[in-house]
Image (cartoon, rainbow, N blue to C red):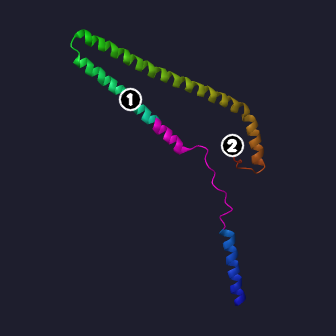
């Protein structure tokens, strides 16, 4: 009976040593992209745009106040003309920014189309290689490693 208990205790100790070891697990891979840093940058940009918008609204309020306080029609027309120029500059600035975004998007589309053509030209080779892998029993392809 003592031999049986000793054997079970040894077996349990061995199982604990084998299945309880977590030190062999590799540490989780750290992401190269820092999400917290990106969120902080977005927050800074939001604050910057809010400050710019606040200045813009203050200028519009100033134009309104000057227009209301103007005594003569000539002063009112001068303020109206000045406000018109101010708004025209703002609209042109926004249109320019929009045009630049569209140009950047067009460049991205051209790049994607080039990648698509490249993939299309390599498709027969990929199909042949994948067919050979499946016939050899490699049903699930290996993970693609990123170039360092």
The magenta stretch spans which residues? 21-44
Residue located 64% across and 56% down the image? 27
Q: Secondary structure at mark 2?
A: loop
Residue located 69% across and 70% down the image? 18
Q: Which of the image's four quarters has the C terminus?
A: top right
> How far apart are labels 2 and 1 at the CA level?
42 Å
The disc, 2 or 1, on the residue closer to the chain's N-terminal end is 1
Q: Which mark is residue 53?
A: 1
Residue farthest to the top, as pictured: 74
Comparing 80 with 72, the one in front is: 72
Position of residue 85 in the picture relative to residue 127 (left or right): left
Looking at the rendered structure, the number of numbered marks drawn on it comes to 2
Residue 28: quarter of image: bottom right
Comparing 116 with 69, the one in front is: 69
Residue located 61% across and 44% down the image? 32
Residue 29 lies in the magenta stretch: yes
- According to the picture, the residue beneath numbered tag 2 turns out to be 146
Comparing 109 with 148, the one in front is: 148
């Amino acid at each position: 009976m003592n031999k049986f208990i000793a054997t079970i205790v040894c077996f349990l100790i061995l199982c604990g040593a084998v299945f309880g070891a977590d030190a062999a697990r590799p540490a989780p891979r750290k992401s190269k992209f820092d999400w917290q840093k990106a969120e902080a940058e977005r927050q800074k940009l939001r604050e910057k745009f809010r400050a710019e918008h606040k200045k813009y609204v203050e200028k519009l309020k100033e134009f309104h106040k000057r227009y209301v306080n103007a005594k003569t029609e000539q002063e009112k027309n001068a303020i109206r003309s000045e406000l018109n120029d101010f708004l025209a500059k703002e609209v042109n600035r926004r249109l320019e920014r929009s045009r630049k975004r569209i140009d950047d998007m067009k460049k991205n589309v051209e790049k994607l189309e080039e990648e698509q053509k490249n993939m299309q030209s390599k498709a027969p080779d990929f199909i042949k290689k994948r067919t050979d892998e499946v016939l050899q029993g490699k049903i699930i392809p290996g993970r693609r490693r990123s170039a360092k």
